[in-house]
Image (cartoon, rainbow, N blue to C red):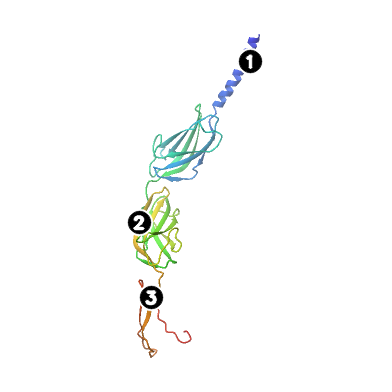
Amino acid sequence: MMVARNWKILFFVVCFWIPLTLSAQDTAPSELTIDEPTTEQFRQSGESLDVTYSYNDDNPSAMAIRLIDGSGAAARFDFDDSGYDGGNSQKTVTLSLSQADSGEVADGTTYNIELQATDTVGNSSTASGTDLLTIDDTAPADLTLDAPATEQLRQSTGSLDVTYSYTDNNPSAMAIRLIDAGGTAARFDVDDSGYAGGGSGKTVTLSLSSPDSGSVASGTTYDIELTATDGAGNSSSVTGTDLLTIDDSAPADLTLDAPATEQLRQSTGSLDVTYSYTDNNPSAMAIRLIDAGGT
């Protein structure tokens, strides 16, 4: 009787315990989420991309991350997820874009990101994000310094308008450097993320007394160098020679050479005035005849 009773107990335990165990094993990872990136990222094909995800599972095993283009072609990256705690905590992995486990990425292509979490018994869940990565190996093209095209004279407290144009699908930044003969530069950084990028001209105003780095000096002539950088870090440069001279020095040794004595003239007559001075960049002479009242 005791043996029969023990078998009944064992039969009860097996019948109820095994289904419960199998039921747990039949549950796929839940709440799988791509936490980062959430907006489009730009990378060169030789760079890397961090992907952060989270999900819930008692027996995590593997994570497959696929970068999928518009035609369905994919680059796949496989990760051992057995050490993941499975409790919806975030985990970040780094994809070396040039070293996919299968497939490859291509310049000029935009990718969806698909995650597939798999547990130890083979249950899996997927999550995907649209247009989260663009591969860009192409530098900005047709970069042109449109203005100034000839030497400009400015005081160090003045400003200078610079106009440029180039073509790029993902413009990001413009660095403008004023470079002297010794290679010393004043640098001005411009956010170009809003630039149309289609070869249209853009004009920026440089406040010469407030560069982002360096400074300008009186009596110095500068080349202007432009460096356009896109969202993936590709860059192009162009330089214009001797386009800016800083001049903070007033004309020197200004002398009224003639007349030296009082001259008498009718109001309809004329008067010759002779003068001299020293300056590297003469521009204008103003001559005023002032009466005793200041008029």
Q: Is residue 243 above or below residue 116?
A: below
Q: Are marks 1 and 3 in contact (CB under 8 Å)?
A: no
Calculate the distance from the C-alpha at mark 1 to the C-alpha at mark 3: 115 Å
Q: How many marks?
A: 3
Question: Which disc number belongs to residue 9?
Answer: 1
Q: Amino acid at mark 1?
A: Ile
Q: Which mark is nearer the camera, 1 or 2?
A: 2
Q: Is residue 265 above or below residue 125?
A: below
| In the foreground, 41 or 154 | 154
Residue 229 percent location from the top left of the image: 40, 52
Residue behind mark 3: 252
Q: Who comes first in sequence, dot 3 or dot 2?
A: 2
Label 1: how many Cα within 10 Å (few below 14, some 14–19, many 20+): few
Q: Which mark is nearer the camera, 1 or 3?
A: 3
Q: Is residue 32 visible?
A: no
Q: Is residue 17 above or below residue 170?
A: above
Q: Amino acid at mark 3?
A: Ala
Q: Who comes first in sequence, dot 1 or dot 2?
A: 1
Q: Quadrant of residue 270?
A: bottom left
Q: Residue 182 vs residue 26: left or right?
A: left
- Which residue is outermost to the right? 1
Residue drawn 44% across the image and 56% down it: 190
| In the foreground, 279 or 136 | 279
Secondary structure at numbered mark 3: strand
Residue drawn 37% across the image and 80% down it: 255
Residue 292 percent location from the top left of the image: 47, 87
Residue behind mark 2: 238
Q: Amino acid at mark 2?
A: Val
Q: Is residue 94 visible?
A: yes
Q: Assign the N terminus to one quadrant of the image.
A: top right
